[in-house]
Structure formats: C-alpha cells, structure tokens
Amino acid sequence: MKKIVVLLFVFLSVISFAIKSDIVPQHEEGFFVNFENIGFSFSNVEISTAPLLNILGIYNLRFRYYLQENILVSLNGGVIDPFVFPSYFGEPRPTGGYLYIYYLNTYNHNNFNFDNFSLKTHIQPSLYGVMMHINKLDSEPFDMGVNAITIKGFSQLGYYLTDNLELFGGVEGGYLLSFNVNPDPNDPDFNQVIRKAKEESLYSIGRGGIRFYSGDVFGVELGYRITLVDGFLKILQGYTATDYIYNSFNLVSIYTSLLNEDDPFKDINIPFITTDYYLSFTVKF
C-alpha cells in the first residue's frame, strides 16, 4: 500500500506542470524586490520579508521551498507590536509593561493537473499567541502568555475552460487543536471550557466559482461560499485579502454580541466584501 501511495505521488508530481498553477513561481537566483517582498532566492529556496508590514509593526519573515514547480512548502512567522501604528498618530506607548502578538504559519500547497482538470490541495497548521507583562506598583508584576494551535485546509477540483480560465469547486475546513495559558490556571472549569471550545471549533465551507489567471502572480476569483458546519473557527476561514476583510466584519459582530452591544455592521452590506459571494484579486500562493 505504501509503495502505491509513493508511486501515485511521484506520478502526480511529474504531470503537475501540464497547464496552469496557482503557485507563484520561484524568482531567479539572487536578490529580488517586488511590490510585496524583498528577499533572496537560491536552489529551491526563497527567504523574504514584507517591508511594508515591518513599518506597521508586523516584523515578519517567510521561507518558501519548492519541492516541484507546483508543489510548495511555505513557512512564515512574525511578531506584532500593536503600539507601533498608533504611535504614528501621536499616541504614546504604554509604560510599565509590554504586549506582543506572535504567529507561525506553515502550509503545503499542491496544484496537480490532468489535461484540462486540476486538483488543488492545501494543509495549514498555525500557531497564534500573545505575551504580556504589566508592572504593578502595589504587587508583583503580572505576566501571562496565551497561544492556540489550529489546522485548516481545503481540497478543490477544477476544469480549465482555457489555459487562463478555470471553473472550480471544493471544500474547506478547520479545527482548534490546542489552547494553552501560562501560567496554567489548573482549574477544572477552565479545562471544561477549553474542551467545549475545541468541540465547537470545527467548521466546514463549500466554495465554487470561476478563476482567471494573468501572468505569474496575478489572478482574479469570483466565487460563492456556503457554510456546511458553522464552528466558531470560521472567523479564520479563507486565504485571501477578501476573506480576511470578511472575517474582520464577522469578528466585530461576534465581539459586540458577547458584550450585548449593538452590532455596528449589522446594516452594512458591501457587495463582494461582507457577502457570501466574493471577488478576490489575491488567489495565488
């Protein structure tokens, strides 16, 4: 059975160059600069950073390894200083402590082509965390760390109407693997809350639509998403800028409902942004 799986993987790898791919090809060897990143390319590896994000206090680094032209492993991480951006508007940094947000994402993305048909698979484990330290005048300093590990991915089938135009449909899903607090509360009630959160985290979304490729890095996707399993981790659904904006609106709605406040976005309906039908210009990995 293992030999069959290995042979099938090799077979897919060989034919995966057939038509198009949603993977941005590797830069030529040496230093490179584009609108998003500056970095260095060598062998099958790229190391880069997005300098615009660094300016905003999102200090980031990305590592990409091309197993094949259409088989990619990517690792990116960073530390976010949430007080850098407000400081540009004259807001002073808080004294007596710090707050940092950190993240580490890795994914394997594959684009296999069979004549005019395509199979795209994506698996992405992620680590998100917060570290804070508060100095107190009348007691010991307060230190706390929180982190969560999630996993999500999707599988899509597509059909190329032309080399640049693809119909697609697929399923995406995600799950909360763990949630940790340091120092550990060691509270049975807290542990029960975590168990419930994991049980209710599972989400699944169906997607379908049409995708247009232009050149190596540009693509447009017009699609529709439908919720199959409505777990709370759906606030992390998607992989494009349009998805992240959609998630931000939903996150604000969830937050205000928890506080029993009016949702400021309840009457806002922005086509392709806050709706289940969407338009995205960032569809390549």
Image: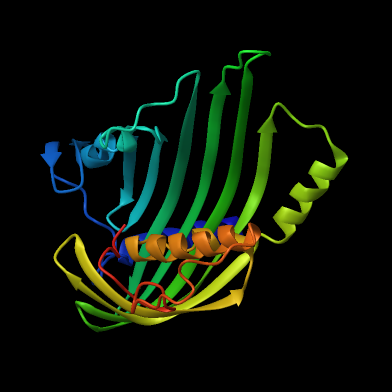
Residue placed furthest toward the bottom: 161
| Of 3 and 137, the residue lying toward us | 137
> In the image, is 119 to the left or to the right of 210?
right
Task: Name the residue nearer the viewer: 14 or 218.
Answer: 218
Q: Residue at x 50, y 58 (%)?
A: 236
Quadrant assignment for the N terminus: bottom right
Q: Position of residue 85 (x, y in %)?
A: 31, 37
Q: Nearer the viewer, residue 178 or 97?
A: 97
Q: Position of residue 121 (x, y in %)?
A: 45, 64
Q: Is any atom of residue 168 visible in this view?
A: no
- All told, the count of numbered labels is 0
Q: Image height check: is 162 above or below 2?
A: below
Q: Residue at 58% across / 70% down in the picture?
A: 204
30 shown above or below 71: above
Q: Residue at x 40, y 36 (%)?
A: 82
Percent x, y of residue 29: 14, 38
Q: Residue furthest right?
A: 188
